[in-house]
Amino acid sequence: MIKVHLIDGHAVVRAGVRRLLEGEKGIRVVAESASVAEGLKDLAGHRPDIVILDVAPPAGEGLEATERLRRESPATQVVILALQDDGLFPVRALKAGARGYLTGTSRPEDLAHAVRAVAAGEVYLEPAVARALALRPFSGERDPLDALTDREFGVFCMLARGESVKAIADSLCLSPKTVGACRTRIMKALEAHNVAELAHIAIRRGLVAI
């Protein structure tokens, strides 16, 4: 039996995912959490094989959540549901430790396929995302966001959503000075003159919601 833990801030989304999985043989939803912090507290008691993490913008927080989940429970694999189908975020998500990635365009049956594949030790990507990743090295285009480290990418997404340096520092357990230095490097790498321009870049790439 594959034990699944759902983490999503929206009860309606959790109910929908649970309904999709309840009829699947060999899969059981053992827990639901409304936040990553809540989910981390529940991991030890339920010991799920798979965490399904719904990631809404900003993407940086989803990457941080994935890293925390993998760090706290190495035996638990992460499958991400995301709005982002840009090739950039799936790459970052896989680097952060996710083993599955689906978007809002995935078919309902793809969710169970992803759970079974990841539980079997495989990586599962929505076909459209897999094609985009495969073709990305041959696009001939240089993506300036590739120049950002994982930490800088996370800070970039949070700045773009309008969070203050202090709030970001508190959320990521960093000093405001470190976050300020990240902001300077990010703006230089992306040739942005202010946070408003960072927000415009992030919105255009689908990394934060309008």
Image (cartoon, rainbow, N blue to C red):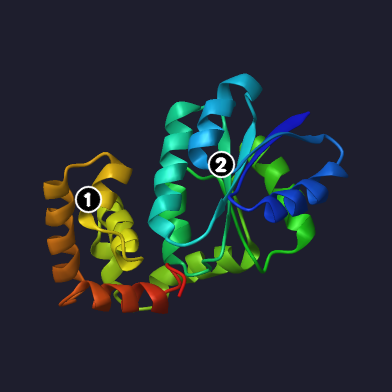
Q: Of the residues shown, which amino acid type is indicated by label 1?
A: Lys
- Give the image location of residue 137, x and y in percent: 39, 69
Look at the picture and state if 97 lies above or below 131.
above
The quadrant in which the N terminus is found is top right
Secondary element at tag 1: helix
**Residue 78 disc label:** 2
Can residue 122 be seen by looking at this rendering? no
Question: Which quarter of the picture shows residue 28?
Answer: top right
Q: Nearer the viewer, residue 90 or 66?
A: 66
Look at the picture and state if 60 lies above or below 36.
below
Secondary element at tag 2: strand
Q: Of the residues shown, which amino acid type is indicated by label 2?
A: Val
According to the picture, the residue beneath numbered tag 1 turns out to be 166
- Give the residue at x 32% y 44%: 171
- Give the residue at x 29% y 75%: 142
| Sequence-first tag of 1 and 2 | 2
Look at the picture and state if 186 lies above or below 210.
above
Can residue 197 be seen by looking at this rendering? yes
- Give the image location of residue 42, x and y in percent: 58, 27
- Give the residue at x 30% y 52%: 150
From the viewer's perspective, tell me whether residue 132 is left or right of residue 46: left
From the viewer's perspective, tell me whether residue 85 is left or right of residue 198: right
Q: Nearer the viewer, residue 167 or 205?
A: 167
From the viewer's perspective, tell me whether residue 91 is left or right of residue 166: right
From the viewer's perspective, tell me whether residue 152 is left or right of residue 99: left
Label 2: few (<14), some (14–19) or many (≥20) C-alpha neighbours in 10 Å: many
The quadrant in which the C terminus is found is bottom left
- Give the image location of residue 123, x and y in percent: 58, 47
Label 1: few (<14), some (14–19) or many (≥20) C-alpha neighbours in 10 Å: some
- Give the image location of residue 203, x and y in percent: 40, 75
